[in-house]
Image (cartoon, rainbow, N blue to C red):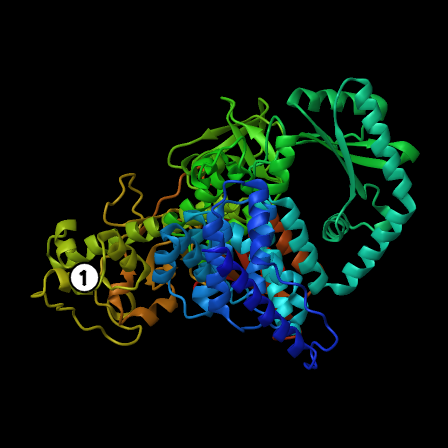
Amino acid sequence: MTNGDQITVETESAQAHDRTTQAETTSPRTAGRQAPPMMRQYELVERVKRYHPEADETLLNRAYVYAMRAHGTQTRASGDLFFSHPLEVAAILTDLRLDDATIVAAVLHDTIEDTSATREEIDQLFGPEIGALVDGLTKIKKLDFVSRKATQGENFRKLLLAIAADVRVLLVKLADRLHNMRTLGFMREDKRARIAEETLEIYAPLAGRMGIQELRDELEDLAFRNLKPEAFETIAKRLENVSARNGQLVETIERDLTQRLAEQGIAARVKGRRKRPYSIWKKMERKSLGFEQLSDIFAFRIIVDTIDDCYRALGVVHTAWPMVPGRYKDYVSTPKQNDYRSIHTTVIGPGHQRVELQIRTEDMDSVAEYGIAAHTLYKDGRTDQPSKLLNESRAYQWLRRTVDLLAEGDSPEEFLEHTKLELFHDQVFCFTPKGRLIALPRRATPIDFAYAVHTNIGNTAVGAKINGQIASLLSELENGDEVEITRADGQVPPPAWESLVVTGKARAAIRRATRDAVRRQYAGLGRQILERAFERAGRAYSDEKLKASLPRLARTGIDDTLAAVGRGEIFSGDVVKAVYPDYKDERRPTVDGLSGHGWFGLKGSESLKFKVPDGSSKPDGRAIPVRGFNSELPITFAPEGGAVPGDRIVGILTPGEGITIYPIQSKALARFEQEPERWLDVRWDVDEGNNQRFPALIVLSVINEPGSLAKITQIIADHDANIEDISIKRPTPDFSNITIRLSVWDLKHLTSLVAELRTTRAVSKVERLTD
């Protein structure tokens, strides 16, 4: 491109901008507003060449001209030329000192979405690297993060997949969001709220996770201003008042610190700053404090030359002023996962004012300011591509690990929940017995620690030691703790853990393990049901034969089919017919009503074989063992009356719920006469030392006299039974009917209790209900 071309382009741009400005003066919405000057072509080149003298000037010029012509006279909601927006995004990225390709992608980032430009054209004119960046940004622009949760989660997946391929996509998107937030006042109120919420929930935390703290702070403040304008203005005004009152104090502390450090031979730059409105608001909200109760409004940054100087400066500070206990953090020896390194301490400074100090080197300060972008800076004449430098970045490694979670098959909602948890929490640093550093969110437990080390360690965890002492798995971990996990093979994490852990990885893993355990339970139940069904049909069962019939059952695998049978979604007879198409079920007809032979008129049907306890110690392999509510199978007990060990029992398979256990004498079984495929052979399998109670229901007819109920409840307590529920009805003036829902150990326990109740003078009648 010649200089003449460049001058012509600038003239065209200026004329177009003049026309837009003139039009704005006639618009009611922008009347009286002066449009900001648009960055010129040479200004963009100069901004890049300030930090990268070898920048490709021709490439930058071509991008400027192409984008300006593509956007033409398009305007934004503010009335400004649309082309001013990508230029401002590029300007933000030059402050982060990014490479030529990223700056060009910023200039072009809206062309595919908002103009007639195509990906093929971008590739041809600017190369596939820039084309891929622009295409990634185009895809992100279509995502909506304030829709219903499932869609939000799926969109968040797409966002992370787009930025994981090249993190520069995220850097451009963050700059794009920052400029949009700066000009958000021209949007409708509902749209402002949606974009601000999205910024606070997604983009500001991502900027923080990538270590770009200054950008995160501004995004949070802008979102806060739009979501809670009154709170923002109140805090901003109070901060201004505090600054006006303490301006001299800030200068005094800066001067004093610089002098004390110089006296010890430490060259340092000291910078004081006040905290941002959003961070103040969050602290007030988190700690339930009023503004007047905040004592550390100001923070000071001490920039030194070496790591050794960091610790020497810390010694100078702590010698001069008393340290506030519990406010010392060393992120130099244990950096945050976004690469942040600094020493934090709080002291009681001049005027008894709390002073928060951050001590770091120049390189640490660069990472704190630029975050992941610091790994793409041009240092000492290096022109490495960012993709090579990003291997140094722990923040990028976190991004890659997060994207790897996509392969674990979580639902979009679970993935979004996990990633938000990872984004928002501060950290504690713990160690394995071998010295491996594990970073966790605050309030993390040994369970979170176990899952952070490896999913299988979390799934099999049964105990923990913290700093050599046995501790609860629910203990809250602190910085520097050494954690050792005790494991047991075959252990399955209790579902209750999901609500007790704080990391998304642990929650997702526990949820998966619980689902897998339930699936295995149903599959085991389904296998027993099928083996019994094939035996009744006189046909041989094998997994190979079942596998061959899967297409007829519309199932993808053996385990899937077995689980479906266990859940009652597929009846066992249908599987037999699918494996043996020539099989015909010659079930004998049943007799209606409760009369006749056998149970409820089943006439001893050959298709039903009920297994009952016979006192033998040898278990029947065909009967399904029942251990109670915490058994390995999905089991519940009859809603009216329950069942206790010692009862003769049958199981009824209920689709989607598992097995319901009924005593053999229960009249409710009559409802299932016409569905013999749902009847299961079951037996008790309860150890003598079992500490689990089982449900039973009794009804008493009691004489109405003072103390009757107290006598009954005392007898129940003396027999170590537990009253779950009690109801009283008074059919006559002299008698009351009391229905008591109990939990007892077994039939012998229940029989003993009923026998003593019958001997009580106030009780005229006792019977057990099994309906």
The residue at the far front in this view is: 4
> Does residue 102 appear to the left or right of 761 in the view shown?
left
- Would residue 91 be seen by someone viewing this image from the given angle? yes
Q: Amino acid at mark 1?
A: Val
Q: Residue at x 10, y 57 (%)?
A: 538
Where does the image place residue 454, in percent across and percent down from the top left?
Answer: 43, 35
Residue 528 is situated, as x and y percent measured from the top left of the image, at 25, 51
Residue 268 found in image quarter: top right
Residue at 57% x, 56% y: name it.
89
Res 579 quadrant in image: bottom left
Q: Position of residue 408 (x, y in %)?
A: 38, 48
Above or below, 363 relative to 574: above
Specify whether 575 is left or right of 306: left
Residue that mark 1 sits on: 575
Q: Nearer the viewer, residue 763 or 271?
A: 271
Q: Is residue 662 above or below residue 623?
A: below
Residue 751 seen in the figure: no
Question: For the point 15% across and 61% down, which residue is it?
Answer: 576
